Amino acid sequence: MKQKYEIKKSCLRLLGMTVLSFFFVACGNDDIDNNYSRNNYEVNLTASSENVILDESKPNEVALTLEWTPSHDYGNDYIVTYNYQMELVGSKADAIKEYEDGGMFIRNYTNKELQDLLIDKFDQLTSTKGVMKFTVTASTEGPRLIVPDIATVSVTVKTYGAKQFMADKVFLAVEGQEDIELVPTAGNPQQYVYSGELPAGRIYFPVLYGDEENAICPVTPDMAITTESMEATVVDRTETNAWILPETGNYRITVDFDAKTVKIIALGEIIEIDKLYLAGSAVTGEDIEVARTLENDNLYAFRGELKAGSLYLPILFADTKQYAIAPKTEGAQDVEYAQDMPLKQIALEKAMRGAYWNIPEDGIYRIVVDAENQNIRIYSQDTDIQSKVVGPWNAQNAFGNTQDETLKTYSGPIEKLWMYGTFNGRQTHDDGVPAGFQDKYTLNQSLANPNVFVYKGANLPRQTAGDYWEKNQITGSVMFFVGVKTDDGVERTNNNAYAFGSTADADRDEKRCGYITATAGTSLELVEGQDDNRYAYFIIPENTNYVMVDIENLKVIFDHK
């Protein structure tokens, strides 16, 4: 059926409505009812059904009929036109409008016509319900102003096709047990999480959505579970297949409707963490959050004051604290400082009852948790990792004090690194530091290791500028200078400071810079000092938003994360 997509514009009608508005204003507070004297509302729009389920097997069968009655007959001096409109409630697509003057007060839509309209025009998803709103406006023009007669009707229409990751209710189904209803997490209504004991065998996830009984299952039938998020699909429950649990045990299951994945892991095999905390009698007051490090999403670190007492680490996952990190060996355990100690994930209540590490005395501690390799290191103040000290080097320019002769043989710990090169044009700078240095392009110390420095943020620029002696135009060059802190607490540096450059061939006396092109994710060597290495640069890859510098092992990685 061919349809028109027209919008009727009528200056006369606009003028009439304007006159009508003046008329109402002029009437003031007089009570006037023109419903019977001037306007007769007689248009009635009806639909053949309020709920339509489109049938893919009958594409040419009429699925929906709309009919409307004519407007009031005001006589030969009046002309009536009808504007027919359809829209999908909530769709960003424009409504479809048709101009009807041929006396056709009926519209028929087949299954395929409605399917195509909803999918192609209004962007409704397959196998979902949408509310279509139909409107007929009868406009009458003639000697007198007649208010338009408007009628509407709404119809819920369900499309056919591939099933969507949508649900009113979600369940877990395993062999030999009744279905277990899952509930969405408080922080993410599109994510369902279950933790508990399950038997070995087949597992899938029944879904109720409207009038459908579906199931979430693997794309590949009878798939063995992995430790990664697994691709899932939605099918009719009668056609479902399943994942295979290898053995009876405690599992954590995450059904993610946004990612369209299912993750099934045995508790203890992988530790899933949204946030990690310190708790126990070693912690004063509320639990203390342990920060996720910038260099490794599976590494968590804390440095601060603890009291003598018990220590365990509650895990926040899916908005709940059900589990904690505790010693792998049962019971309370003494700390082996600066050594990898095995850990495990246990019920939080069990950790609170007596599964923890003993902190022997009050003090400053560094704690590093490796959730991937499942070990923990605890450093006391005496065994803690110390910041690398370099020197002697000439720090007069870095401190901005060329008169202080003692700064010519300065030695000090490295606590901050500044990026320098043509990557940012080398002219822009922050107050108090020379051209080319910006605080937003500094690298910060890792909490896990003070000799690892990390930048993680916006993509680094790759501007082009002249090299140090303006001999060549270079794009995206970077090296690293040590920062110092003056007596007034200001962070400073200079391009004559102690530096970490590349292994490129560079020579200060010959005024020659050197460059090595970095590959994303590849570890490269650093050269430290205050000599030719200050002119040896790296050319950063496109879209670099992560830089990790290890000044102890003299390695650097540029990457996009």
Image (cartoon, rainbow, N blue to C red):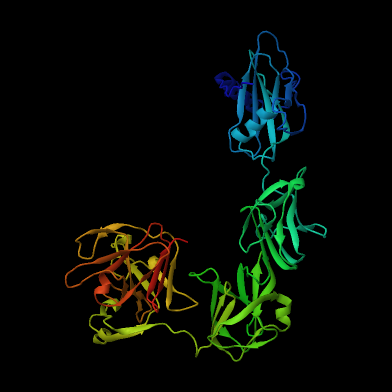
Place of residue 410 in the rendered image (x, y in percent of width and height, measured from the top left):
30, 85
Residue drawn at x 71%, y 46% is 235
Residue drawn at x 49%, y 69% is 294
Is the residue 548 above or below the residue 106 in the image?
Answer: below
Q: Is residue 100 left or right of residue 385?
A: right
Q: Quadrant of residue 285 in the image?
A: bottom right
Residue drawn at x 24%, y 63% is 467
Furthest-left residue in this view: 510
Query: Which residue is more in the foreground, 46 or 330?
Result: 330
Place of residue 67 in the rendered image (x, y in percent of width and height, measured from the top left):
73, 22
**Residue 455 visible within the image:** yes
Is the residue 261 above or below the residue 306 in the image?
Answer: above
Q: Quadrant of residue 390 in the image?
A: bottom left
Place of residue 502 in the rendered image (x, y in percent of width and height, measured from the top left):
31, 70
Q: Quadrant of the N terminus?
A: top right
**Residue 169 visible within the image:** no
Furthest-top residue in this view: 76
Q: Is residue 214 left or right of residue 77?
A: right
Query: Which residue is more in the foreground, 111 or 453?
Result: 111
Q: Is residue 495 left or right of residue 92?
A: left
Query: Which residue is more in the foreground, 60 or 242?
Result: 242
Residue drawn at x 19%, y 61% is 471
Place of residue 194 in the rendered image (x, y in percent of width and height, measured from the top left):
72, 63
Is the residue 84 above or below the residue 54 in the image?
Answer: above
- Please state the total of marks drawn on the protein image: 0
Query: Which residue is more in the foreground, 244 or 186?
Result: 244
